[in-house]
Amino acid sequence: MKPFFIDYPQEKIAEHQHAYRCAYCKIPTTVIFGLIENHDEACQYRQQQSKWVQLEAKLKPHHAHFDEPHADEVD
Ligand SMILES: [Zn+2]
């Protein structure tokens, strides 16, 4: 399941009664639909989030596949 990103700054679309868009890339929230990749590539919010995602990936320990000792294994 993909994480939803809905904490981006939004602004009202003047031409539409109940429509909002990203304050940075001006893409409507109905198009973004909570997905980071639906923001414009140059979107400040998207770039910021991407940075965090990359940073998190770096901080997460990679589970190396080392052999667990099998104490109960008998030759
Ligand atoms: Zn955006």
Image: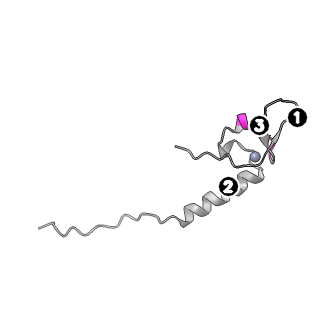
Q: Earlier in the sequence, mark 2 or mark 3?
A: 3
Q: Which of marks 3 and 1 is in front?
A: 1
Question: How many neighbours does mark 3 have within 10 angstroms: few (below 14), some (14-19), or many (20 or more)?
Answer: some
Circle 3 is placed at which residue position? 28
Q: Is residue 73 above or below residue 8?
A: below
Task: Decide if ligand 1 comes within 8 Å of the CB at mark 3.
Answer: no
**Residue 12 sits in quarter:** top right
Q: Is residue 11 above or below residue 66?
A: above
Name the element at disc 1.
loop
Q: Nearer the viewer, mark 2 or mark 1?
A: 1
Q: Does the magenta stretch include residue 29?
A: yes
Q: Residue furthest front?
A: 18
From the top left corner, tell me how far across and down residue 37 is, in percent. 67, 45
Q: Does the magenta stretch include residue 60?
A: no
State how many labels appear.
3
Circle 1 is placed at which residue position? 14
Apparent side of residue 36 relative to residue 10 in the rendered image (left or right): left
Q: Earlier in the sequence, mark 2 or mark 1?
A: 1
User: Looking at numbered disc 1 in the image, what kind of residue is underneath it?
Assistant: Ala
From the top left corner, tell me how far across and down residue 14 is, in percent. 88, 34
User: Looking at numbered disc 2 in the image, what kind of residue is underneath it?
Assistant: Gln
Q: Distance between the residues labelled 2 and 1?
A: 27 Å
Circle 2 is placed at which residue position? 49
Question: How many neighbours does mark 2 have within 10 angstroms: few (below 14), some (14-19), or many (20 or more)?
Answer: some
Q: How far apart are marks 2 and 3 (CA)?
A: 18 Å
Q: Give the range drawn in magenta.
A: 25-31
Is the C-beta separation of discs 2 and 3 under 8 Å? no
Name the element at disc 2.
helix
Q: Which of marks 3 and 1 is nearer the N terminus?
A: 1
